[in-house]
Amino acid sequence: MTAPILIFGWGNPSRGDDALGPRFIDELSALGLPDVECLSDYQLQIEHALDLAGRQRVLFVDASITATVPYAVRGPISASAAAPGFTHALDPHGLLRIYENFYDAPPPPCFLLEIRGESFILGAPCSEAAQRHLAAALDWARKWLE
């Protein structure tokens, strides 16, 4: 059975604060929330459009160097106007366009949570600032899920 809520985080755990998306998913998964499925990957890919099917709502979670401190929430977000290029790395808007094209239907309501990161250096640990931003974002998510 498909959980009504999907939370999908992405990022590279080896690139400092880029790990915020997967770390968010790890923390939220540990709570064992009913009706919530948590998924993570290095990047959004075409195949992830299938993960959106049958959901009541979706929260995308990513690290961002431009988000407000400690995080920014956008949504509901919409599909990009144009079809994304032939690539495996997508943004959420491109993924929603793929969903619409594949299912010939609108996607479920989707939101984007961008957690502010400070350093995305290969091999660096997650910064202290990013860890504080992650904690604040998790607090917001718990309320969003109520």
Image: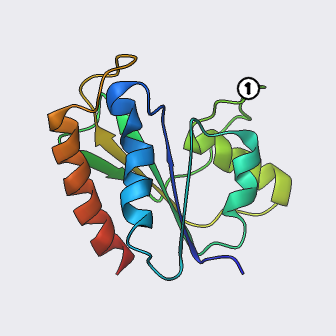
Q: Using the rendered view, name the quadrant where residue 28 is placed.
A: bottom left
Numbered marks: total: 1
Instruction: Read off the residue under disc 1.
Output: 87
Q: Using the rendered view, name the quadrant where residue 13 is placed.
A: top left
- Specify the amino acid type for callout 1: Thr
Q: What kind of colouring is applied to the model shown?
A: rainbow
Whether residue 70 is visible here, answered yes or no, is no
The structure residue drawn at horizontal position 36% and vertical position 59%, both measured from the top left corner, is 27
Q: Is residue 53 left or right of residue 66?
A: right
The structure residue drawn at horizontal position 63% and vertical position 72%, both measured from the top left corner, is 55
Q: Is residue 66 left or right of residue 29?
A: left
Give the vertical position of 67 relative to 30 (above or below). Answer: above
Specify the quadrant that holds the N terminus.
bottom right
Expressed as whole percent of the image width and height from the top left, the position of residue 42 reads 56, 36
Expressed as whole percent of the image width and height from the top left, the position of residue 24 reads 37, 52
Badge 1: how crowded within 10 Å, few (<14), some, or many (20+)? Answer: few
Q: Is residue 51 left or right of residue 129?
A: right
Give the vertical position of 108 relative to 134 (above or below). Answer: below
Whether residue 91 is visible here, answered yes or no, is yes
Q: Which structural element holds mark 1?
A: loop
- Looking at this view, is 62 or 17 the one in front? 17
Expressed as whole percent of the image width and height from the top left, the position of residue 98 reads 75, 46
Specify the quadrant that holds the C terminus.
bottom left
Expressed as whole percent of the image width and height from the top left, the position of residue 21 reads 42, 45
